[in-house]
Image (tube, rainbow, N blue to C red):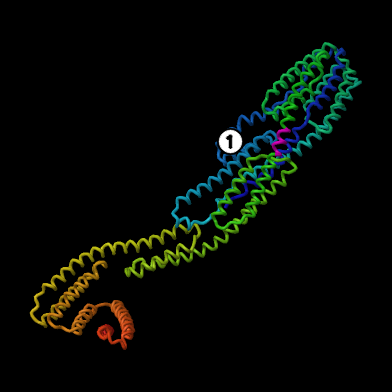
Amino acid sequence: MADNKNLNTENTNIREENNEVDNLNENVSDEALQENTSENTEQKQTSEDTTELENTTKNESLNNPAETPTEVVKKVEEEFNPADYENKTREEILDILAKLINQYPEKEIKKNVLHIKMLFEEKTAEYKAELFQKRAEERKKMSEEESENTEQEDLPIDNLPEKLAELLKEYNQKQKELKQQEKERQTKNLETKKAIIAKIDSLINKPEAFGKTFSEFKEIQAEWNETGEVPQNETREIWAEYNRAIEGFYNYVKINKDLRDLDLQKNTKIKTELCEKAEALTELDDVMEAQRRLQKLHTQWRETGPVENDLKEELWERFKKPTSVINEKHQEHLQAIKVQQEKNLESKTYLCEKAEEALNGEYKNNAEWKKASNLVQKYQKLWNSIGYVPKQYNQSIYDRFVTACDGFFNRMREHFDIISKERVENLKKKQDLLNTAVENMHRDDWGNATRLFKKIQEQWKNIGPVPRKHSDKIWKQFRVACNNFFERRREYFDKREELENNNLVLKTQLIEDIKEAKIENRENAVLKISEFQKRWQEIGYVPLKDKERIVSGYNTALDKIFETFGIDKTKRINVKLDRKLQTLENADADKIKAEIGKLRARIDEKEKEIKLQKNNLGFFAGNKGSEQMKLEYEKRIKHTEREVAELKTMIQKLEKI
């Protein structure tokens, strides 16, 4: 039976992909506008002059993480290249998935996990299709009898889809935990950044030496840069507060213009590099990846301080241009995804309708059930290859398809459960026929035995198939028993034909001997006739096609002797009967019983003949012109009555043996 668990894992992660598509539809230009505003605020400090701070800027580090998420993704792609998955088995693919989940952050392997899931489901569908094809080919190679004895058998249990579901469940759980941790971390970061802003505010009018205060300020800035993201809805406000505190501190310390110019030059260099990176992203074919990288560049832009005033607008316009290009591509990509999802919805709706047709179909026999099963599995394979639908229809369309498929396979299972019970009964019936064949395969009463074997063979065909695990064995045993009997029968009749041909030669020669016999008197004639009859009986049967001719020749030759020596009919018959009795004296009871049965059959035939002759005799009553014909019929009737009497005498003698 088809196994339908390959669909059950799809629903677990399908929402996650749609959420990703929706989340990627963010427009980074709004953030960039805020960043540009904060830059204008910081730019006001370019005229400040504080010479004692010249060496303190060397400790500033705006963006130098140990290993960025992009680098992690790159590392994953290098170690787990999706192109390498195609030639791997399902077991190997699951091992890769387990390794990814255990070794790398969930957020950075999402693309790999989705790819592995879809590839696994495709390979599972191919595995089932190949299994059904293999069984179909096996059935084609069977003989007609073997094919009839072959039953529908469930597919082997496939535990791999369950293992995939467990791994995806583990992955999703880690995602939930990660999101919760991220939420808690962002909340904690928000409190940390509020505390940092408070520290900056506390530096103003601090009585310590200015150099020490500025060093402390730089340490606070470094702490700010090292602190991670805050909740999205708090981002604008916290940055505004941070920029306000920075502006207040710069107004307080009145930074040295040369030192400030050095800081502006450094920021200009950083933002120029960010512009170049943004421009390079416009050539990237992967629109989603370009959008993700662009967001990271905007974060770096925002965290970088102000630039030289005459380059501010120029750099911002340069940075904004590739941002607009990538955003436009991103929006087009999202729109294309939506269009494709609508098409996918149409395709999956059609598959739902076809699956429901299969569910409600009427099937007359196992072949039609198997044909429908192959179609439903084809629908499942197509379903997995189509892709996602709009989020609002995702659950409903999935539930509709799974309900139809599960309903069909449940109906099919119930059908074959009934068939299975019938096949157990068929097995009992065929076992009885097998026992009959084995018990009778050594019989040599060829007529009755042959009729028996043909009868049980016909019954075997009409019984129907048995459970598959017994099918080949019981069929081979039955075939061996039948073949044993018919082979013995063939060998017997091959030898019998040769023997009968030899008997024909011997009986032909006997007839010639009878014709040429030199008999001196009546007594010698009776002895010779007995001798000839004994030889005739000892020779045995001749071919059926020659029987009438050879018997006629034999009787004619004997009758000539009877007539030559004046031996009457009664004496002739008695001689024949005595000869017959002599041959049966040592016979077993069954053979004597069979001979009596033959004699009774001949008596029945003769009595019917007498009755018919008497009826014909009635037609001649009162007809003067038919006296001669009447006498002839009366003569025949008397002769036939004598034969009946002789046959009855023969039966009486046989019964005394």
The one of 125 and 447 positioned closer to us in this rendering: 447
Q: For mark 1, give the secondary structure.
A: loop
Q: Can you say whether 375 is above or below 223 in the image? A: below
Count how many numbered circles sit on residues in the image.
1
Residue for point 73% across, 33% down: 335
Q: Position of residue 225 (x, y in %)?
A: 78, 25
Q: Position of residue 462 (x, y in %)?
A: 47, 63
User: Residue 621, located in which quarter of the rendered image?
Assistant: bottom left
**Left or right of residue 172: residue 466:** left
**Left or right of residue 134: residue 50:** right
Residue for point 73% across, 29% down: 330
Q: Can you say whether 605 is above or below 32 in the image? A: below
The one of 190 and 236 positioned closer to us in this rendering: 236
Q: Quadrant of the C terminus?
A: bottom left
Residue for point 22% across, 64% down: 501
Q: Can you say whether 350 is above or below 603 in the image? A: above
Confirm whether the magenta stretch covers residue 283. no
Sort mark 1 into few (<14), some (14-19) or many (20+) by Cα contacts within 10 Å.
Answer: some
Specify start and end residues of the magenta stretch as a single range: 334-342
Q: Can you say whether 113 is above or below 401 in the image? A: above
Q: Position of residue 238 (x, y in %)?
A: 85, 29
The residue most toward the left is: 520
User: Residue 111, located in which quarter of the rendered image?
Assistant: top right
User: Residue 572, located in which quarter of the rendered image?
Assistant: bottom left
For the stretch drawn in magenta, what is the main secondary structure? helix
Q: Which residue is mark 1?
A: 85
The one of 579 and 589 positioned closer to us in this rendering: 579
